[in-house]
Each structure stands twice: as C-alpha cells, then as structure tokens.
Amino acid sequence: MNGCVRLTLLAGAVVLGGMQGAFALDADYWRGGWRTELGTDPHIYQFVIEGDTVRGHYCTSCSDVTTAGFIDGTWSETDGLSYTVRFPNSDGTIHTTLNQHAMLEGSQITVTGDGVEGDLILIKDPRGPDIGSSPVEMYPPGTPATPAMEEPPSQGKGAGSTVQPTSEGYWQPAPFFEDLAVDDVAGTWVALFWGGVGMNKQLFNFVRFEDGLRGFVCGRCDNPWTHGGLEDITLVGDVVYFKITHEDWGPPGSWHQDAGRIVDNEMIVAAFLDDDVNADNIPAEGPPIQGFVYSMLGPISPEATAGTSTENVDIWGPGTGDSVEPPEGREPVAFAFPE
C-alpha cells in the first residue's frame, strides 16, 4: 500500500477519533515499533502491516546487526500476530527460525512462543520520535503529535539535510558501480544527513537474506520510534531501489521511495521519488540525482557491528545518563489507546 493511501486512512482515523473504542484492534493500533520496558533486557520489534500480512524486523541491540532477524506472518483483529522471525547468517542462509504469536492487550503487546520464557511484554517507547522541524504525528490514532523544534540545531536533528541540483550539488568522484549485485550493497551504511553526527546518526542495514536483501534503518537504534523498515529492495543496473517505511510516525503510515547508486565507498541516494518500484515494476531508467539527495558511507559487515549498542546511554537525551525516569520538564508520550 503506498503512502498516499495510508495517509488517507490516517485522515479517516482522525475524523473518527471520538469512536476509538470501536477500533481498538484495528491494525493502526498494532503497527510500528514496540520494545520491552526501558532499563530491561532490550527486545525491539517493528511490525509492518498491510492487509492481513505482517513483515518487519526484530533485534536486541539493534546497532549490532548480528542480533537482527526478519518477521513474516499474518495479522487479524481477533487472532493477533502469528509470525516467524528468521535470523540470517552473513551469507544469507537462515540459522534460526522462531515461531511466535503476539496479542494486543490494552496498551501492551504480549509475545509468546519460541525464544520467550513465559510472556514477553512490549510497550510503545515513552520517548517517542525525535523532535523535528515540523510536528511528528504518531499512531495509534489520536496520539498527540510531537511539538516542532523552535530552531533547528547546527548539529543533530535537521542538520545536513539539503536539496542539490545534479549539475552543481554532487561532484561524482568516480564511475558508478555497474550491474549492482547483492555483495555490492550488503552491509551497514552510515548516513549523516538527518540525525547529524553521534548518537542520532542513521544506520542503513542492508542484510543478505536467502538470495536477496532485507533491511532496516535506525538511529538512535534503541528507540523503535527512530526505526524504519527497508522494503522492496530491488537491484536494477547501477541503481538499488528501496522504500523506507515510517510505519507509525512522521506522518504515520507513510512510505517513501529512494534510489541509490554506489561509487567507491559512497552510496548517493535520491529520495522521495514519485515511483513505486518493486520486482514487478522496473523503471526504464534510473532517476537523476536531484531533489532531496543524501549520501552514505559503507558497507560495514554485520560481524564488524557486533557488540555495539546505545541501550541505556543517555536514555532521555544528551547528558541524561541511564535513568529510566524522564528528567524534569520532559513528559513521556501519552498514547491514545482505548481504556
């Protein structure tokens, strides 16, 4: 489902805000990122729901790509989420498959099945998304949007975003790789275009999975609100196409189409394209490098990310340390789940 359709559904949910109780099990209450309580062993899930199909990703220390697995299954209002989590080796073969089930109960999701001792309780992260230059809307429907920052900082959120014309904005350092293969793209690519440097830098993880690629982007990586899925990863000539799924934020339910080319250790990406590309819908030619353009450096192998984590580091922002309690003046997000 494309972003336009999903945003139309969102608008309908807002109009019907006074009738939330009737939609308590609607997919909009389930979709997106969930995690265990702050300060406990991390388990982060991202559910991408389209119709009765669920995809997504799971990880513990999510900047450590060796902890990541990918979700496939079904969803229904009555039966909840039934899915597998499959964990790939570095060559794409699957080393572990977990069969799990999840049910929404009030404002929490309870996970049972393989790999879970008893019940695993997931919550919506009370920190919410990073505050940006415009309000960030969130699911479930009726949840107040984040406020907008008064002035974008010189570093951090909003820093580095740019609009570049092809002729002057990008000085190509070498020929683009031709006939991209999985090995050219697979790995973690570090982007500094949105999160700035440091904690909020964006990590684009293209992971070998069976014969192709699956992936996710995060930054910071312990907060599921700063995650997105990478869907429909498609290699065509010198272009890798992928969609970034903002499943429950910014504005909620929106996907956007990006297209990257690789030169040396850089991926240069044209974003927010009008195309909707997948294996059954291949453009006749790649898009020009213009409009909203960003650059990423990589790839870093999954093994090289092992042991990295932002869990319990300045949980509520710079200098806040490992306390799970919000600092003075910081209000946790009040999510609009029915009573």
Image (spheres, grey):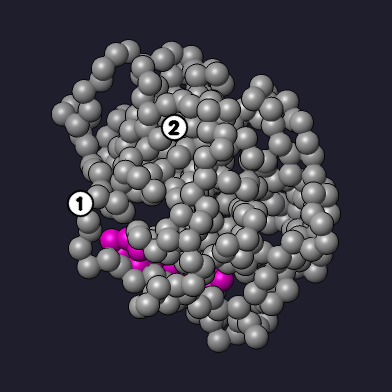
Q: Amino acid at mark 1?
A: Ser
Q: Is residue 303 visible to the viewer in this orientation of the structure?
A: yes
Name the residue nearer the viewer: 310 or 184.
310
Q: Report the residue at 42% width, 38% height from top.
A: 258
**Highlighted range, magenta:** 131-142
For mark 2, give the secondary structure: strand
Question: On residue 154, which mark appears?
Answer: 1
Q: Position of residue 70 (x, y in %)?
A: 67, 42
Q: Secondary structure at mark 1?
A: loop
Using the image as rendered, state which of residue 66 and residue 299 is in the foreground: 66
Circle 2 sits on which residue? 189
| Amino acid identity at mark 2 | Trp
Residue at 58%, 46% (x, y): give it: 61
Q: Main secondary structure of the magenta part?
A: loop
In percent of the image, x 34 and y 71: which residue is there? 147
- Above-or-below relation of 277 to 14: above
Image side of residue 310 versus residue 100, left or right: left
Q: Nearer the viewer, residue 49 or 94?
A: 94
10 Å crowding of disc 2: few (<14), some (14-19), many (20+): many
- Tell me if 322 is positioned left or right of 165 in this view: right
Instruction: Write the residue at 57% across / 51% down.
Output: 1
* Tag 2–tag 1 contact (CB < 8 Å): no
Q: Quadrant of residue 145?
A: bottom left
Q: Is residue 271 above or below residue 6?
A: above
Q: Is residue 2 above or below residue 104?
A: above
Question: How far across and how far down the image is residue 58, in percent?
Answer: 65, 47
Q: Earlier in the sequence, mark 2 or mark 1?
A: 1
Q: Residue 77: x, y in percent?
A: 75, 68
Q: Picture coordinates of residue 78 (x, y %)?
A: 80, 69
Residue 3 in the figure: left or right of residue 75: left
